[in-house]
Image: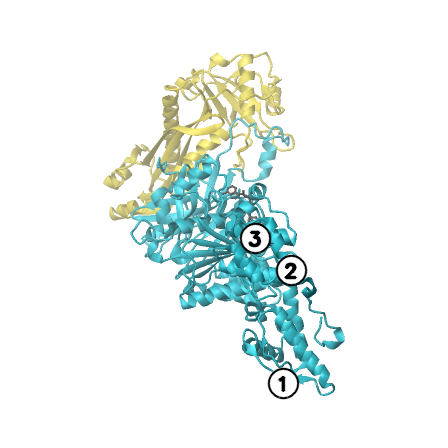
Amino acid sequence: MEVLVNLNSIRSALAGRGLTVASMIPDAGGSRMEKASIQLARLVEGISLQSIPVGPVQAPPEPIAFLDGVQRSEVIAYAGASPIVVAEIAAAVRERRDRRLHTVLEDRRRVVLARPGALDAAGETLADFHRVPLESEEAPHPIRDLVHAIQALDRARGALVLDVGYRYRSRSDAWLVVDGALSESPCWAGDPRVVGVSKSHSILPFDGQDLERYLRLPAGYRSSIYEPHTRALAPVRAWALRLWPWEGKDLLHGLVRIEVAPAHGSTQSADAISRWILAERTPVSAPDRRWDRLLYGIHSVEQYLRSRTA
Amino acid sequence: MPPEAGPIGRVVATELKPSTPHQFHFWTARESPIGIGSLVRVEENARVVYAVVTDGFAYCDLVSPLHAVIGADGDPQLAGTEPTARAEIRLYSAAVLRQVPEEPLQPVPLGSVWLASDTDVILALRMDGYTGHERATGIPVGLYAAGGLEAPVYLDCDFLLGPEAAHLNITGVSGLATKTSAVEFLLGSIFQTFPAHKGTVAAVCFNVKGPDLCFLDQPGTLSVEDLRQYQRLGLTPAPFQNVRYYAPLKPDGVNLNTLRTHESLSANTEPLVWGLREVLDYAEVVLNRDDIDAKADAFIDFLAERVVGREYLDETLRTKPFLVQSFADLEDFFRRIFDFMEAMGKGGEVWKTHHVATIRKVRNRLSNISTRSKGLVTDDGLANDLPWGSFADRSVHVIDVAGLDPLAQDLVFARVVSKLREHLERRDLGVDHVIVFVDELNKYAPADGPDTYVRKMLLDLSERGRYLGLVLFSAQQFRSQVQRRVVGNAGTGIYGRMDMDELATGGYATISPATKIKLATLPKGELMLRHPHFTQPIFVKFPRPAVLNSREGIERFPPAAELPFTDAVVRHLRQFDRRISGEMVRALIDGRREEDVRRALAATRRERPADVYAYFAACLGRRMTSEAVSPRRGIPALSQADDPYGR
Ligand SMILES: Nc1ncnc2c1ncn2[C@@H]1O[C@H](COP(=O)(O)OP(=O)(O)OP(=O)(O)O)[C@@H](O)[C@H]1O
Ligand SMILES: [Mg+2]
């Protein structure tokens, strides 16, 4: 992971205030791993889960846009046993015209996450950072507090991504491809121009035979449409789509979950959108490890944001 | 004029590709006017860097070609149809021409990159030092063109014609490199712009190939684009005003050995004829050096100092004094010596300390010259030469040696260059600077092969000429085949379209691969320049020379047919006086010995009398009876046995 620059002067200022300076980049993956579970969904196409060929790939109409966000954090000091985490979060939309991607919207924020007491101790030193106080009844614990901080940071980034996406949608009628699930936001869940493409399968919508069929979709096939168990408020339509042959690799290789507004819950829409997403599997986003599921457009937003986060 | 819209790129430096004081890299948008050879400016804070683009790279974010294969499912037809084109980069390398300030010399800053403007080109090439002021010394050589900008490029005549540096060499493949054309154009430019405060200048050109330089005084056909370029360079498209052609005669002694024999061009075309004196002074050029020992040298000196051109009396040979002025006289002199020695019988092996073998050898060599240079070297001693001492400012003297035997060519080179040198040393040539143009330099100063007199002379010229105002402009297809020091001494180097194999030779190691490719595909009329003020080679284009090219020239002025002796004489005389008719001349020379006619003709040419016919008739003298006509005695070859050195 890259290091946030120019933190050294802040560190010495914090040291001057009696804090214990630190320099540690937390492991992003660990705390974000969702708990694996099965949350049964409701089929809305047919009566049992089918694998359905989506037909020949077809590039989506232009312009089309991709949205993603990044975050980067670093423990900068400790107030007693409690860490102070500084981070930068950023989100951007890159729009495609004539096969070329251009950044059309971008926002970034520097935040500091810590218990309120620690924030007070840091005082003016972190005046330039947006403060995220982490309230807690529990006694300070460096690891537990860090997990909380990273979860808060995830939420802050999610909010920024939503905000940037909302701003884009309010000025453009182009399709917007979002990295992840739609169901977390009521305003997207109903948006007929937003497609969520999820790489994560920690929560699976079926069990038994259905699940086996779901996990064994051949390349170019989708599952029947279903309505995921609503974790948050907004109901959406979803299906799984296999982008690359998985045989001999892994059950999850090339498997993505597509989420759209209920308005696009028809067989026709699901087929058409699947054909688009299938087209978007190239160019491949290798050498990213997740290239089998990471669309190039999303990858490009990520690359762009990282290149601008010094 | 400059499209100063905004920066077109940005310097990037990484640990692997850092900026140095001499080189840097920058990226541009996918579409940009940048190309190999473009001049750019980098600005950052108070530092400005001028540079020339030497290489370019494009790549995308693909890490392994395998990912492209996977993306296209192994089907080349699907490649390139991805909905998103991959992110790509255009990355260029540039070599620094100049930094401002020059001190302290630092790595190129990571600033924005601009396409050079008119003023930038002047500064980048340091032309501000020698153009645009009262004592300017700039000579327009061509136009630098890139991204809609077109800026004149100047050479500094202090570095082209001395004294700071001098000489020019041009190289490139046949026909496409436009070498001869470029030299013609540049000579024209020099004649038009050589500043008055630098004195006077003339050119001596050796025409070594067909009709190459035969029409320098005739206007050529120029395109609208050519004319526009002339205007942009501030030059007038006009042929040379003052050109004189010199060509040896053919062996018959009356027809000119050149392709410039069309009647309407005869006014400034004259024979180049040398006599015994002229040849003997340069004997060592033509006498194969290894084969001439001290003894032969001594005998040649004896001939040159005691015999040729003065009265020489030796009663043992002849009671009447000798007056040796021509090869024929010399041959008679030799005859007498051999007769005398024969008569002596045994003991007659030495004449005046010279061994008979040495005498025979010198005689054979000299007769060889007169045979192989027939037409250049006259038997009868009346020479017609360049106007030594009265060279006019801006005059061109073309010597056509294309039809001559290599030995005779060497003789011409050696004598002309030596004479130029002598006169320039004495400051009595008539001009302060002379440009000597030698095409096909590889023939006269080859990289390998014997160290001939001509090669040594060219080397000497390239090393010392600039102090004298004697400047060598040379051309050849393959620079690698020319003696290194001769081309190495050329302050200015020009490269037209080049051969890839030639570019692969050691002499081009400093040129970047992309620049080599550009050189190997350079269109006609574009050149790469090296000049002392330019830190890096620069590409320019130039217009066609404003003179008739050789192909059209030959069509418009087809060479006159070679005439029988009498008709040729008539033509010569009519050139001096149109009123002279064929009948008059025929009546006069019928039955005369050809050498007498030639001598009379040469005398008339030299004198240019008011009454040409009368003068010519007088030279021929009283009409001789036909009995007096004896066949001209050639020089009989001596048998091998007689001449231990014979070939
Ligand atoms: N500025 C120019 N632009 C375009 N064409 C040109 C230009 N100058 C000369 N040419 C053309 O290029 C051709 C070759 O020119 P030139 O005889 O000068 O070449 P060269 O390099 O001397 O060839 P060689 O090695 O055979 O002597 C000619 O036909 C001429 O018309
Ligand atoms: Mg030529």
Q: Earlier in the sequence, mark 2 or mark 3?
A: 3
The residue wearing badge 1 is B353
Q: Colour of chain B?
A: cyan
Q: Position of residue B529 (x, y in %)?
A: 46, 50
* Label 3 chain ID: B
Q: Position of residue A101 (x, y in %)?
A: 46, 29
Which residue type does callout 2 highlight? Answer: Arg
Q: Which of marks 3 and 1 is nearer the N terminus?
A: 1
Mark 1, secondary structure of its residue: loop
Mark 2, secondary structure of its residue: loop
The residue wearing badge 3 is B572
Is the CB of mark 3 within 8 Å of ligand 2? no
For marks 3 and 1, give the CA distance. 47 Å
Q: Do labels 2 and 3 share a chain?
A: yes
Which residue type does callout 3 highlight? Answer: His
For marks 2 and 1, give the CA distance. 41 Å
Q: Are marks 3 and 1 on the same chain?
A: yes
